[in-house]
């Protein structure tokens, strides 16, 4: 097939022509950004053909689809992965060399699509890549937020949030489908079961192409935007403002009722639009609604899209005139739910009055579901207490997770330990009733982005050492293990790290003005700022280390220089998280400017940690900080990206760390701290006393004194101290001693080069399991049962 990208010459011609069409310029007169626009436009146009073929194949072969409903898709930049997956990267590179352009620089001109805040959103993006690459009819469904997750700057050592108006620049990969818009009703009153006088909002879809790797498959992510609806006769200023607010930003402030309504409006927007869209397609293809489960699975990514369950009931009952039982049978064969967190605060609940006001008919349906569920539980001879506890509605709230479990045929956790905790503890009542629904799908990451794209240096080594086709099946990477004691390969891995460290050093220098030492251990903690993730434990250890290095000359001699790198955004209203950011930054100021220790210790907090920054950080790490309070981190996926790039985990036995240890061997990670069982036990027995630990540990007392001295006002950080000394819900002080010991082990191990690089190789070689291709295959074999698109 002849297209723009089949040869260097045809690409250069097309590039020249497009440059002239778009900008009326010669190619060598263009700015870097204009080059990006031309390249992305050409690629996007070329992808149309395979996109149409994919759609046609799915339609003609009547393939079942999975629609992945997720509040977040943290895509990052698409240019590199699209070029790579389409197989055009080398042609473009050669042509750009001829033009004298730097492809890498042009790729960096794309703005991150930051439609997510953390692990759950990035997982959704990895799933799109993996599913398309496996040729599965898998489609994302979410919101086209006008503003991405906030841009973080550090000013005066504090986090300051700025908006991310990413759509102010054209998003080349999307295509608006005005003709497929859907009107969504909010508010109104009920007349029986009929909703009267609702406020109508138009949901307009935009498709973002998703390119499979070397298989010609192109699927999409569908993002819904809001516009005024023709059905809404009165369109005053208040209405127009409401309409634009709905798709304006991710996780708007929910401290007021207005904010809460807005969040629920967002959830209903993409849930309802996605479901109506699927039903419209199903009917247009002449299929019977009874057969919906043969053609669709709706995967609910955490509880934000829960409303698809009552919404589907509403459509089947009110618009398709089905009986309740028949409708329920369909719903419970199409809906599947993934749980991503066990923190109580994240188990979503909505106040009944608020829910009822915004979605009167949906509430009525949830009430009926609740009535029937309570009867069902009664039939199982459960106590009234237990029934009240498990019900869908109770204590003034609608409980989203309970609706998901009741309405789905599958409930999965995201790592082995996490699923066990759900079954045995958090959701045990439900597990007793529905053991067959519960299953595990350990997370994974796409090795196309998190290895091939970000670490060509390591790719070279793999191509020399691994005979199997690891690009297609990452498990082949296990062959690298044969070289674990091969000194020349160890040396190559070490050189790879050095190269990646140098690249990161430049980026960090430009961002923060701090120049890191390439010979130091790169110790990196990058993830959302949360108390359970315990960035606090990390910085407390850094402070301890600093104080010890200053007073202990012998220790200085045995210590290998170490750079501590943090990257994290705190939720804007999360007070404790913001104090921790400030402590890290103020500590960095002191340590980095102390001549006594400046060759031994450096601390940096990178600004605005996002997907693009992550692409520099993961490959440069020696130590991967995974130090959450055991039982709290559902899985983690950063831990997998570090492993795949040869970092050693310093961590607790939490989330997917447990499986990382299983695969790589416990001798190849640095594990410390309380176990999940011990933590759970301590909660139960109410036996933990942080004050006692503090009173008996001079090191912690010194650390707290140091933090006090960071501000003129010695009470400035009292909020933090009070919490840690009186509550310490996340066992920071309890694990301090074990963490100090683990860090000291790490520092010594790094100086034993043969052992260290052997450990590093063992991590890379055993990362195959953590490919999201494996994860997606398991979802498909055990939950979705989709057939493959063959082009
Ligand atoms: C996030 C947020 C963010 C701010 C406002 C409200 C709100 C409500 C819910 C959530 C859900 C976050 C759940 C989440 O991201 N879980 C992470 O999922 C990852 C992928 O499965 C997993 O690796 C992480 O361990 C888990 O924390």
Image (tube, rainbow, N blue to C red):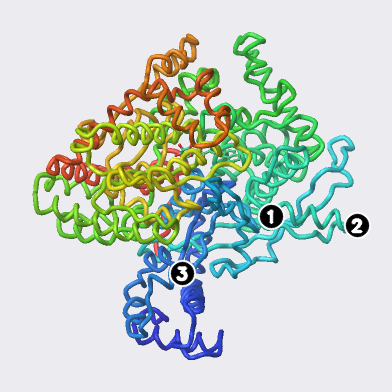
Q: Is residue 761 left or right of residue 315?
A: left
Quadrant of the snapshot with the C terminus: bottom left
The answer to whether 372 appears left or right of 637 in the picture is right
Q: Are marks 1 and 2 in contact (CB under 8 Å)?
A: no
SS for callout 1? loop
Quarter of the rendering occupied by the N terminus: bottom left
Callouts 2 and 3 close, C-beta under 8 Å: no
Residue 776, how many percent across, how many down? 41, 46
**Residue nearest the viewer, comparing 516 with 362:** 516
The residue identified by callout 3 is 50
The relative height of residue 529 versus residue 377 in the rendered view (above or below) is: below
The residue drawn where x is 43% and y is 27% is: 629
When the figure is inspected, residue 573 is found, relative to residue 731, above or below; the finding is below
Q: Which mark is residue 791?
A: none
296 sits to left or right of 628: right
Q: Earlier in the sequence, mark 2 or mark 3?
A: 3
As rendered, which of 747 and 87 lies closer to the eye? 747
Q: CA distance from mark 1 to mark 2?
A: 22 Å
- Residue linked to disc 2: 234
Q: Residue at x 29, y 55 (%)?
A: 501
Residues at marks 3 and 1, CA–CA distance in whole angstroms? 32 Å
Residue 324: image x %, image y %? 71, 32
Residue 106 in the image: x percent, y percent? 43, 73
* Residue at 69% across, 54% down: 247
Q: Which residue: 53% across, 36% down?
A: 711
Q: Earlier in the sequence, mark 3 or mark 1?
A: 3
Q: Kindly indicate the quadrant of the structure image that contains residue 741.
A: top left
Q: Are marks 3 and 1 in contact (CB under 8 Å)?
A: no
**Disc 2 and disc 3: Cα gap in Å?**
43 Å
């Amino acid at each position: 097939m002849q297209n723009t990208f089949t040869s260097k010459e045809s690409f250069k011609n097309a590039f020249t022509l497009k440059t002239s069409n778009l900008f009326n310029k010669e190619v060598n007169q263009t700015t870097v950004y204009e080059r990006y626009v031309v390249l992305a436009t050409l690629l996007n146009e070329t992808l149309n053909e395979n996109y149409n073929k994919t759609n046609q194949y799915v339609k003609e072969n009547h393939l079942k689809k999975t629609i992945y409903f997720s509040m977040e898709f943290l895509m990052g930049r698409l240019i590199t992965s699209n070029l790579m997956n389409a197989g055009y990267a080398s042609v473009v590179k050669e042509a750009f060399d001829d033009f004298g352009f730097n492809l890498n620089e042009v790729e960096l001109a794309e703005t991150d699509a930051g439609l997510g805040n953390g692990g759950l959103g990035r997982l959704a993006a990895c799933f799109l890549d993996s599913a398309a690459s496996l040729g599965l009819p898998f489609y994302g469904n979410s919101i086209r937020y006008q503003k991405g997750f906030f841009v973080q700057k550090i000013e005066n050592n504090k986090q300051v949030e700025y908006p991310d108006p990413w759509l102010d620049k054209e998003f080349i990969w999307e295509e608006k489908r005005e003709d497929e818009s859907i009107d969504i009703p909010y508010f109104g009153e009920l007349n029986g079961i009929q909703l009267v006088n609702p406020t109508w909002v138009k949901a307009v879809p935009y498709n973002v192409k998703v390119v499979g790797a070397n298989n010609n498959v192109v699927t999409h992510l569908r993002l819904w935007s809001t516009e005024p609806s023709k059905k809404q006769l009165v369109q005053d200023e208040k209405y127009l403002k409401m309409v634009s607010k709905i798709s304006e930003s991710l996780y708007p402030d929910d401290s007021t009722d207005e904010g809460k309504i807005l969040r629920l409006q967002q959830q209903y927007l993409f849930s309802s639009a996605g479901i109506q869209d699927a039903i419209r397609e199903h009917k247009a293809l002449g299929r019977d609604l009874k057969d919906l489960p043969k053609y669709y699975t709706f995967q609910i990514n955490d509880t934000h899209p829960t409303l698809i369950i009552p919404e589907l009931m509403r459509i089947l009952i009110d618009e398709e005139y089905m009986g309740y039982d028949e409708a329920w049978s369909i719903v419970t064969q199409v809906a599947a739910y993934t749980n991503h967190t066990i923190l109580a605060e994240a188990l979503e609940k909505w106040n009944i009055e608020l829910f009822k006001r915004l979605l009167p008919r949906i509430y009525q349906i949830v009430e009926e579901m609740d009535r029937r569920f309570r009867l069902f539980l009664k039939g199982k001879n459960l106590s009234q207490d237990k029934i009240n506890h498990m019900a869908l509605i109770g204590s003034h709230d609608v409980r989203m997770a309970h609706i998901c479990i009741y309405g789905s045929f599958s409930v999965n956790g995201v790592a082995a330990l996490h699923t066990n905790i759900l079954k045995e503890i958090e959701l045990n009542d439900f597990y007793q009733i529905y053991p067959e629904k519960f299953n595990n799908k350990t997370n994974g990451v796409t090795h196309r982005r998190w290895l091939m794209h970000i670490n060509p240096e390591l790719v070279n080594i793999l191509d020399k050492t691994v005979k199997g086709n690891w690009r297609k099946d990452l498990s082949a990477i296990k062959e690298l293990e044969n070289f674990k004691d091969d000194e020349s390969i160890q040396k190559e891995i070490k050189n790879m790290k050095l190269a990646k460290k140098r690249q990161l050093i430049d980026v960090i220098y430009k961002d923060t003005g701090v120049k890191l030492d390439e010979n130091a251990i790169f110790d990196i903690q990058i993830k959302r700022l949360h108390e359970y993730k315990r960035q606090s434990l990390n910085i407390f250890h850094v402070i301890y280390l600093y104080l010890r290095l200053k007073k202990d000359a012998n220790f200085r001699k045995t210590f290998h220089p170490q750079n501590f790198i943090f990257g994290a955004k705190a939720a804007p209203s999360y007070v404790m998280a913001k104090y921790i950011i400030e402590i890290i930054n103020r500590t960095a100021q002191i340590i980095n400017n102390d001549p006594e220790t400046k060759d031994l210790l450096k601390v940096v907090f990178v600004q605005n940690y996002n997907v693009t920054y992550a692409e520099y950080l993961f490959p440069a790490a020696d130590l991967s900080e995974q130090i959450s309070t055991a039982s709290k981190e559902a899985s983690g996926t950063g831990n997998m990206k570090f492993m795949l790039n040869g970092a050693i985990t310093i961590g607790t036995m939490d989330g997917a760390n447990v499986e990382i240890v299983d695969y790589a061997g416990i001798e190849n990670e640095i594990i410390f701290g309380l176990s999940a069982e011990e933590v759970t036990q301590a909660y139960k027995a109410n036996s933990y006393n942080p004050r006692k630990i503090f009173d008996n540990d001079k090191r912690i007392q010194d650390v707290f004194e140091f933090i006090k001295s960071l501000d003129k006002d010695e009470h400035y950080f009292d909020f933090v101290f009070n919490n840690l000394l009186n509550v310490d819900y996340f066992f920071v002080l309890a694990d301090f001693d074990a963490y100090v010991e683990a860090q000291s082990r790490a520092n010594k191990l790094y100086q034993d080069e043969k052992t260290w690089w052997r450990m590093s190789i063992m991590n890379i070689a055993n990362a195959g399991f953590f490919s999201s291709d494996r994860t997606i295959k398991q979802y498909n074999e055990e939950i979705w049962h989709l057939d493959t698109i063959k082009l």
